[in-house]
Image (cartoon, helix red, strand yellow):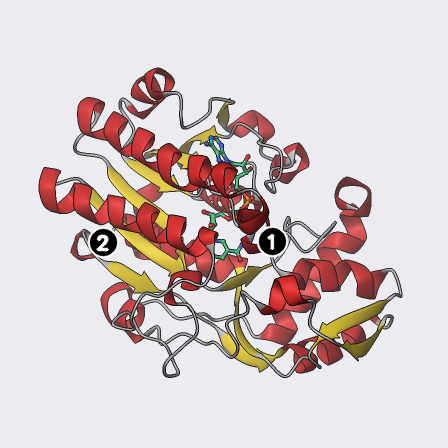
């Protein structure tokens, strides 16, 4: 695509580049000929995995610095043209169990990076990975960017702050920052060992292992699913679009019930089964019910649309994990 040709030779930093979405981003940037710097401290409790950059390891630079290390960030951001800021902690349930760890990663780390950019590279473009969790329980569907922000968990509050820091740094200091609010993103290189990165990865592992998948409350909840390549495209488009600066954008995808998702998944895997179980109270307290995004703003401004169907995306994901099981199980 012509506008992505602009990435050839561009100096691009990917924070969280050893994690799920960041590593898929790094693979794509290498294909586009970008000069890629991955910054990832492989923090425990996150989805970083050295195997995620298998195939591109000698084509990228890697720094194991933590975003909270402001001196290191000051050095690393110098000379970069675009920062895809994907470092974060995504587990909702973990944020309730250890709210201070979530605070450190989702707020302090973001401020540290933004302050480094302000001081050492004020012309850099920054695209931050926000989340739909900040909307809380939807008052209407589909949820657009004007929906009230009423997060139901600690992670939602901190991710909301992370997103707003980027917008405030644009408004006050002119930093060219914006926030994309991701919904359930799935695909190769995601965490499947547990339900830390959402339930889809966990369902995939259970289905491939021929186990019984437990659907809380029967799995009637609607969720929209974005295949990771589509999410990466949205970031890449935002990285070369001036109009996005200082704005929030929802991403989205195909809306399905978790039950339908699991039926499709077990059919693709040819293994696994499912059963309805009661919601554990700890999870019920932070459940948001049905959710799907209105992503017309991203369509209008970024000319972005998810193009991968759920069936295609799940098939590619299952194929990847069948080939790479030993690195993810
Ligand atoms: N995966 C999803 O479905 C989803 C949905 C909504 C939003 N998001 C957001 O997208 C971003 C990426 O998500 P992901 O699924 O790829 O997560 P991930 O856990 O796979 O990757 C995050 C990476 O960031 C690194 N990291 C975290 N804090 C760091 C720090 N302070 N310094 C250096 N490295 C650090 C971790 O080591 C990890 O490798 C996150 O900000 C997340 O909140 C993801």
Which of disc 1 and disc 2 is earlier in sequence? 1
- Write the residue at 22% across / 54% down: 241
Disc 2 and disc 1 in contact, CB within 8 angstroms: no
Left or right: residue 291 compared with residue 296? right
* Mark 2 lies on residue: 241
Image coordinates for residue 79, horizontal then vertical, percent: 26, 24
The image shows residue 319, relative to residue 67, as above or below, that is: below
Left or right: residue 240 compared with residue 135? left
Q: Secondary structure at mark 1?
A: loop
Image coordinates for residue 5, horizontal then vertical, percent: 33, 48
Between the residue at mark 2 and the residue at mark 1, the CA separation in whole angstroms equals 29 Å
Q: Is mark 1 within 8 Å of ligand 1?
A: yes
Image coordinates for residue 142, horizontal then vertical, percent: 38, 81
Q: Residues within 10 Å of mark 1 (few under 14, many from 20)?
A: many
Give the quadrant of residue 209. Answer: bottom right
Q: Residues within 10 Å of mark 2 (few under 14, many from 20)?
A: some
The image shows residue 21, relative to residue 218, as above or below, that is: above
- Write the residue at 68% across / 36% down: 51
């Amino acid at each position: 695509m012509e506008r992505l040709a602009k990435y050839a030779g561009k100096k691009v930093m990917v924070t969280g580049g050893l994690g799920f979405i960041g590593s898929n981003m790094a693979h794509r940037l290498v294909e586009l000929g970008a000069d890629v710097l991955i910054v990832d401290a492989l923090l425990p409790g996150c989805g970083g995995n050295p195997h995620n950059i298998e195939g591109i390891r000698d084509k990228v630079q890697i720094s194991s610095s933590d975003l909270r290390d402001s001196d290191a960030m000051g050095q690393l951001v110098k000379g970069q043209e675009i920062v895809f800021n994907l470092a974060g902690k995504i587990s909702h349930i973990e944020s309730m169990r250890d709210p201070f760890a979530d605070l450190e990663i989702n707020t302090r780390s973001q401020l540290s990076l933004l302050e480094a950019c302000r001081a050492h590279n004020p012309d850099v473009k920054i695209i931050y990975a926000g989340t739909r969790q900040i909307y809380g329980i939807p008052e209407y569907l589909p949820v657009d960017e004007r929906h009230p922000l009423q997060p139901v968990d600690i992670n939602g509050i901190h991710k909301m702050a992370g997103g707003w820091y980027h917008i405030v740094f644009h408004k006050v200091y002119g930093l060219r920052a914006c926030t994309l609010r991701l919904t359930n993103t799935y695909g190769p290189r995601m965490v499947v060992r547990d339900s830390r990165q959402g339930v889809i990865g966990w369902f995939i592992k259970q289905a491939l292992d021929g186990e019984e998948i437990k659907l809380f409350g029967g799995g009637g909840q609607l969720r929209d699913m974005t295949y990771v390549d589509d999410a990466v495209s949205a970031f890449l488009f935002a990285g070369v679009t001036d109009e996005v600066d200082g704005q929030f954008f929802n991403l989205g995808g195909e809306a399905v019930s978790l039950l339908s998702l699991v039926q499709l998944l077990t059919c693709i895997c040819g293994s696994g089964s499912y059963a309805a179980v009661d919601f554990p109270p700890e999870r019920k307290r932070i459940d948001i019910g049905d959710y799907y995004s209105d992503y017309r703003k991203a369509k209008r401004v970024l000319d972005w649309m998810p193009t991968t169907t759920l069936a295609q995306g799940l098939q590619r994901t299952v194929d990847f994990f069948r080939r790479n099981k030993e690195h993810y199980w």
